[in-house]
Amino acid sequence: MADLLSSGQRFRRLPRPSFTVDSELDPLLRENLEQWPHLNELVQCYKADWVKDENKYGHYESIPSISFQSQIFEGPDTDIETELRLANNRQGRNGDATDDDDPSTSGRHSSDTSSSDGTFQKHFGASPLPAYEPVFDWENERSVIFGQRTPEVPPTLCGSGLKIYIKALSLAFQAGFVEPFYGTICLYHRERREKLSEDFYFQFLPNEMQDGMVSLQRRAIFSLDSPSSSVCLLIQLEKPATEEGGVTPSVYSRKEPVHLTEREKQKLQVWARIMPYRESFAWAVVPLFESNIGGGVGGIASPSSPLAPSISGSSSQESNIDLIGRTASDGRMTHYSSGSAVIVEIPNLNRVKESYVEELLQDPKRKVHKPVKGSLRLEVEKLQASHLDIDTLSETGSLSNDSNDAAERLGETGMLKSTGNSTGRTSNGGSKWNVNEAREVGGSRSNTIQGAVLEIGNDDFRALDFRALTKNEPFSQLLHCLFVYPLTVNLSRKRNLFMRVELRKDDVDIRKHALEVIYTKDRGVSFQKWAHTQVAVGARTACFHDEIKLCLPAILTAQHHLLFTFYHIDLQTKLEAPKPVIIGYAALPLTTHVQLRSDINLPIMRELLPHYLQETVKERLEYLEDGRLVFKLRFRLCSSLYPMNERIRDFFLEYDRHILRTSPPWGSELLEAINSLKNVDSTALLQFLQPILNMLLHLIGDGGETLQVAAFRAMVNILTRVQHESSDGAERNRFLVHYVDYAFDDFGGRQPPVYPGLSTVWGSLARSKAKGYRVGPVYDDVLSMAWVFLELIVKSMALEQARLFYNSLPAGEDIPPLQLKEGVFRCIGQLYDCLLTEVHERCKKGLSLAKRLNSSLAFFCYDLLSIIEPRQVFELVALYMDKFTGVCQAVLHDCKLTFLQIICDHDLFVEMPGRDPSERNYLSSVLIQELFLTWDHDDVTQRSKAARILVVLMCKHEFDVRYQKLEDKLYIAQLYFPLIGLILDEMPVFYNLSTVEKREVLICIMQIIRNLDDPSLIKAWQQSIARTRLFFKLLEECLVLFEHRKSADSMIIGNSRSPDVEGPVSPKYSDRLSPAINSYLTEASRQEIRPQVTPESGYLWQRLSPQLSSPSQPYSLREALAQAQSSRIGASSRALRESLHPIFRQKLELWEENISASVSLQILEITEKFSRAAADHSIGTDYGKLDCITAIFMAFLSRSQPLVFWKAFFAVFNSLFNLHGATLMARENDRFLKQVAFHLLRLAVFRNDSIRKRAVVGLQILVRNSFYYFQNTARLRVMLTITLSELMSDIQVTQMKSDGSLEESGEARRLRKSLDEMAMEERSGDLLKGCGLSENALDAISEGSTQNHWSWSEVKQLSVTLLRALDAGIEHALLGSMMSIDRYAAAESFHRLAWAYAHVPDLHIMWLLHLCDAHQEMQSWAEAAQCAVAVAGVIMQALVGRNEAVWGKEHVTALRKICPMVSSAVIGEASAAEVEGYGASKLTVDSAVKYLQLANKLFSQAELHHFCASILELIIPVYKNRRAFGQLAKCHTSLTNIYESILEQESSPIPFTNATYYRVGFYGDNFGKLDRKEYIYREARDVRLGDIMEKLSHIYESRLDSGQTLHVIPDSRQVNADELQPGVSYLQITSVDPVMEDEDLDSRKERIISLSSGSCRARVFDRFLFDTPFTKNGKTQGGLEDQWKRRTVLQTEGSFPALVNRLLVVKSDSREFSPIENAIGMIETRTAALRNELEEPRSSEGDQLPRLQGLQRILQGSVAVQVNSGVLGVCTAFLSGEPATRLRSQELQQLIAALLEFMAVCKRAIRVHSRLIGEEDQDFHTQLVNGFQSLTAELSHYIPAILSEL
């Protein structure tokens, strides 16, 4: 069995720690114990090795931890990747870059693996689970299970007290050191005046007496439970008894310095050699602890403490109790360090002047002690017992070096929580610092500790702690000794008295030698027959302070007694050594007195007689001092064999009689003894707990039924008492756990196993209770202590299994299951059923006992799984599930979850078989069903618990070192895969979960799918389309719930969500990670972190030191949390996060980033698998739309993703479009395609080049597919334009400059760069290579064809189109606040946007309507009407193109005459490229009519009635087609009104003008793009030149900076911009006239606009002119003979009225007229005006009045003589003097002819005037005639022929 238990099988023997030398027990072991079965049991109990079940608490070895890598989450304006790369380059140059600079944390990041055979592909990213649970701690997770069993430290190692190591180094005297000195040291309690430990002996020999051998002092080890200021060291020195007449001891205590002479030295040395007996010499009391530290906890080491702080412990959790630096006397004690120990020097010892007792040491009334002039040096070291580095101790020593055991032993101290984490994982909570601290402390003393413990059995002396024998805890080692303390002897005369002490077996033969049982003081000798005390020199009352230790016989008889022999010795030097003389004897029987704890007084016999203990002999003996009791002594029995309690002794006696069959068969005495155990006091019961339980189990195992029941009831009673009376608050009493786990070994195989009997007796009691019999209150105790019995049954079975198969089992094979007898298993099943019933019934009453019993039953099944056939256990599990079937009461369901939690935590859970051989793991199927049932439960707590169970199990599997092979992971994934099916079948159950629970479930689903093979996934996708959709709904939920968004993210990614929004749960540090993270951070935040905690985090602290020192960031995390709570910021997760220390905040960010990245990559991997499967048409999905893929891709793109995701994404993106491009590019997927285009453009804005370039490639992939499937990019152009429009409204395209003005933003520049790169053929190869795609990835070659449809020129056109829209949007944004000031620029901006989006009808119309609104605000009615016409034109052309309207092409042509800007090319393209939600589908006849009516209304406001008529003529066909006669009547009525208005305008005597036109030239750099450009402005007809000057000056002065000026050039001369003053802005504003279509611009006639007002022509103008007078001599004005004229004709970009108020001048022509041409033209103009008035037809007489008025106006200005500039002026200028000589004859003839014609027409006009006037105008007519005659007379001087002509 010993070999078995050390061979790595289930059980392992642990050598019981022993602190006594084996040879000391020889007297016991030599005796025959077979006749005393109880003694045999006791000895076996203390001597046998512990038997520890290695499987009981589970084994867990995790994979090594791997640090996480920081994930880069880029925003539009961040480029963290480049910054990190530059930082790394700098560090590389500086030479200080280390691996430690990478952020790291606890937890693991499983690396991607791929098998060598290629059956498993490499994963895209890391496993999601490690990042979700980065601090997964198996031990910690198990500990939260209700009723969880926790391992206990073995009994003798669990002490948390102090160990004090003491070694006497040297002794020195002022007088000299020439004789030997001996001493004892013990722990002493000053207040209670009692010894706390046995004595430790030491000696100092002078050099002359060492016989050439150096005396090595032993080291003493004293134990102390807790520090106390009353505990001290009592040191007593003794020396050879003083020779009478020799050198007295006073020589050592003289005040004056004195030195022994050579003669005195020689005399002392000779005497010391012949005197074997000693006398007391001196004593000292050394306090161990500061007196001002109450309770010994939390004090601060005194600077004078002999124990340095580094020895006393620097941990904040450790008590800082230290030795003090003073003695009880006035002398000062000094100390200094030597290695790890402290040297204490005691300068003043107290000399014993007369005999004393220990109780009087501190008596202030007895000042009889003089100081000794000498010093004693001690080496003292204090060590916390819990700091024993158990890993360093060997198997052969007292402790085991097994790492798991070490963890168990240290577990209680809080220094280590997880046994499994010993492979490199960090334990949860704050324990990680404690671990390191413990190792640090342990490491600094490793040599000392190891040496101390290993040498305990060899040379070091371990002093027995007397108080350990009175504690309320079981004895753990074999002790059977007696300490004898002779105190005083009162005699009537002075004597030099000492005594000899011996133990005799009987008093028959007084010459017989005593027993060799007394421990010796000398090294190397184990036992001796007697011991001598000190000599009390010359004392009547002799006081002794000796301690004599005896090893008692195993069985004490009435004859065993102590014999004291009293001697007197003469201390004079004679011829031979002094010989002692016997003066008397004293005897003490042990059996009658050994139990006494008070002092014992005895008389002294003069001599001994045989049988001196018998009363009859005593009467004949002679006594000293008249038989008075003159001898006082004291006993201290230290025995774990001999019980002080009489009832226990009776039970042992009756047990012996029963076993040896010496008692009557009915055994009533044994029953009485068993029943009386219930009355034993608790201390005695606890001390002998283990042997009593062993004996009761023996009786249960092989006794009769009556004995079995009695023993069982007694055992129940004892266990209950122990649980209650010695409880430390734990559910499982540690003494009982020690017994079950270590001490109980089922009698070592010497007897039949105990489990059948125990099961039988308990089962019968349970069945009696079930049948309704009265079993008394004991049954409740049975249930409360059921865990003990169940664990005993299991351990008994396991031990039998190990013993049965050990010899027959081949090496390396597992032990087969134990085959239980049918009756035994049936009994166990019945017992289990009864207990289940108890749980069920008591749960309903809400009793906590039921929940504890439930956990015990679960652990019972857990243990049985490792022992018997698992399918037998499954019967018990099935019985449990049947009992708790369905959704039961909350408390019952909670029990069921706890049961499953415990069962499924089994080490071999994964390998468990099915209940049926054809089934797979039964437990996993039960677990999955119950978990899902729980999620459908109303209880929120249980839902959360069920989700947590699943996560913990998945983590346990994932990190288990046994299951790291891919086939193992696959098997586990297949076990749990049915859970996904259940969720898909009942999705409302999932949606009903809280957010945290959803995350728990989803992370497990991710892990399952990750490890699943492709065939299993495809099989799941084959079931139905709806089910596949739900599967991808789960994946979408994952992306939503694990999205990582930094607070700085302001980009358009999904819906904006506040990070501070909290649910109904408590505030959390993270809402994406496991709930365990919050408890971890909370626990870690409570710790006081110190820089020296761990080497790995040291560099972090150095790097974070500026933050640590800042006043806003407290150094202490405890302070930070207190600060957070005091300021009430704990309500939000952001505030809670901010209160964390930077290290923890960094970890939290790191974990959150990694979980988000790994989830996204995992879903991308699944989607890629789905895409490949869908390409083979092997799954069930909607192949028409592929909605599963499109939905998940939109979820990808709409959320913040890490850089590593984008690097993997575009390869999948390309693959997806290669496989499913036809479906994805179809119209049914327009919405998806538009979303994709939008997000690709969004990514093209990013500052990070890795992402931006990949977005460009993504756009190219879309273009490639457009070419492949449509051979053009029309639809894609529309789609990209639409998405660009949406993006422009979301990104910030402008930014503020330092001077407050706006400029183009970085986002806009990067977007422009990306759109440029999209069309760059030369850069395409590098971009594709950077994305991991082949160079021919963009080839668009159809199947069966060799033609590549890809066209770079078309891509360039696409790029230009998008850039045009981008530029229009940017310019619009740059206007900013100027929009309200410069309405012209605003209108142009809207116009540019409208035409940039012209191929998207919806957007085109939208911006045209914006422009229309802007014009209406400016009251530019004609322009607004043109916008409405343009909108109607877009709709009308689309309808005509689709043949869906009553209109035809001729109607479109008519509309284009009104608005020439209506184009057909882009509209046709837009119609063909209709996109869902956009395009021609929204364009209807009704909408066209609506906008035509709006245009009609606006033209009417502009008084452009001829346009109104044209528009109504377009509306009428619609109403005719619809037979809407009412509307037709309205239209014709409107037409009537319109034509009447037109007639009114034309018949007006004052020519009608609908607008004024001005040429505006811009000169100056400050105008930007307007510099050196000319525009024609169309203004209302009432706007004069001054008005527009003022308006434009106001607009452009507001744009100029302070200090800059604006000048208006006052005339219309030609401007040379290069001659203007630089830095100054110039405006030139000139009034211009519109040019008619058929107007002769080369005519020299002066233009009179009224000449053309009579015709009803379309008032659409695109040419304008103005005349500029000038002279050749440089003057602007001169005489008629010098006045030249320049006529300038301007051609605009479009025609007025236009969509905007101003049009750019694109062409300018000019012609100069000479002075004579000007004069002839002026005369011809007047002649034409008169003739026109005369020849104008009139429809009725009523029209004469307007005609008369016109004639009068023209004649008055023509024939008045006083008009110098008129006809007479021309004659004067050109027909007289020097100018006349310069005229050519042709010019002269033309001038005279013009004058003659003019005068003839005037004459005719005067005649007509005479017929039209009435009486009232006769005077005016007379004036006209006189004027004409005068003018004729004047002209005759120059043209004589005029008289004959007229």
Image: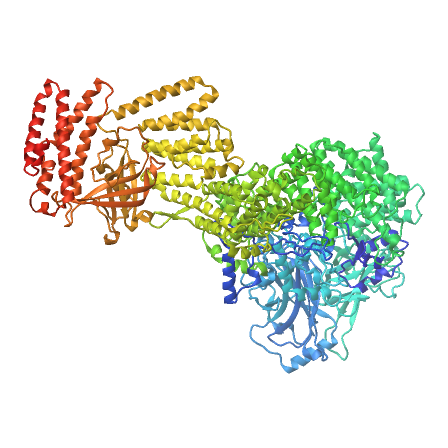
- Please name whichever residue, 116 or 1040, is drawn nearer the observer in this view of the structure: 116
Query: Image height check: is 299 above or below 1420?
Result: below
Against 256, residue 509 (above or below) is: above
Name above or below for residue 1114 compared with residue 176. Answer: above
Q: Quadrant of residue 312?
A: bottom right
Question: Which is more toward the observer, 590 or 109?
Answer: 109
Q: Tell me which residue sits at (19%, 32%) in the image.
A: 1728
Would you identify the image quadrant in which residue 837 lies? top right
Q: For residue 1761, which quarter of the picture?
A: top left
Q: How far across and how far down the image is residue 1400, in percent?
A: 47, 38
Q: Where's the C terminus, which quadrant?
A: top left
* Image quadrant occupied by the N terminus: bottom right
Q: Position of residue 1808 (x, y in %)?
A: 15, 23
- In this image, 162 relative to 800: left or right? left
Whole-percent x, y for residue 1024 in the image = 70, 36
Q: Is residue 694 left or right of residue 1467?
A: right
Residue 988 visible at all: yes
State the image coordinates of residue 338 (x, y, percent, origin top left): 60, 69
